[in-house]
Image (cartoon, rainbow, N blue to C red):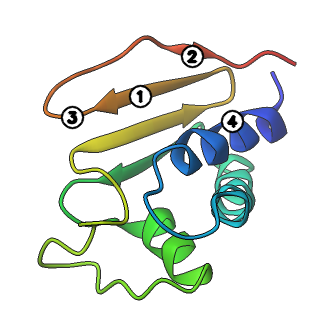
Amino acid sequence: MSIEKAAEMAGKWWAERLQQGNKEQFAEEIRVRVLEKLQTRERVYLECDYDPQGILLEAVRAIGIECGGFMFSADGILPRKHALQVQHDRLEPKEGYANLTDIIKVED
């Protein structure tokens, strides 16, 4: 499967949940970062518990949104308790508290 497609789908998935800012730019910031990680790993985990972490925090800041990354900093930016595990052939989303949703297949 295409890691490029998986990274693109991950960017779009998160951009759909962005509550402020440029969604297209946000999707691209995530895509680039996920693609880089997938070149050396089997999976990438993107999480926003009460605060965006790692790639998500970098992407939020890259589109010009101030975010501390602690103390409920996701409020008004991204939904709480959301996560996405990205693999070469699928995305495994979690939306809300322990709410695993259907696996999304990566299609070339």
Could you give the CA–CA distance between mark 1 and mark 2, rounded to whole angstroms?
8 Å
Residue identifier under label 3: 96
Most extreme residue toward the right is 108
For label 4, count other residues whose C-alpha is less than 10 Å away and answer few (under 14), some (14-19) or many (20+): many
Amino acid identity at mark 4: Met
Could you give the CA–CA distance between mark 3 and mark 2, rounded to whole angstroms?
17 Å
Residue at left offset 63%, top offset 58%? 23
37 relative position to 97: left or right: right
69 relative position to 66: left or right: left
Residue identifier under label 2: 104
* Whole-percent x, y for residue 82 in the image: 30, 42
For label 1, count other residues whose C-alpha is less than 10 Å away and answer few (under 14), some (14-19) or many (20+): many
Residue identifier under label 4: 9
Checking the image for residue 93, the label placed there is: 1
Could you give the CA–CA distance between mark 3 and mark 4, rounded to whole angstroms?
20 Å
For label 2, count other residues whose C-alpha is less than 10 Å away and answer few (under 14), some (14-19) or many (20+): some
Amino acid identity at mark 3: Gly
Total numbered badges shown on the rendered structure: 4
Whether tag 4 and tag 2 are in contact, CB under 8 A, the answer is yes
Secondary structure at numbered mark 4 = helix
Upstream in the sequence, badge 4 or badge 2?
A: 4
Whether tag 1 and tag 2 are in contact, CB under 8 A, the answer is yes
Residue at left offset 68%, top offset 20%? 89
Identify the image quadrant of the C terminus: top right
Upstream in the sequence, badge 1 or badge 4?
A: 4
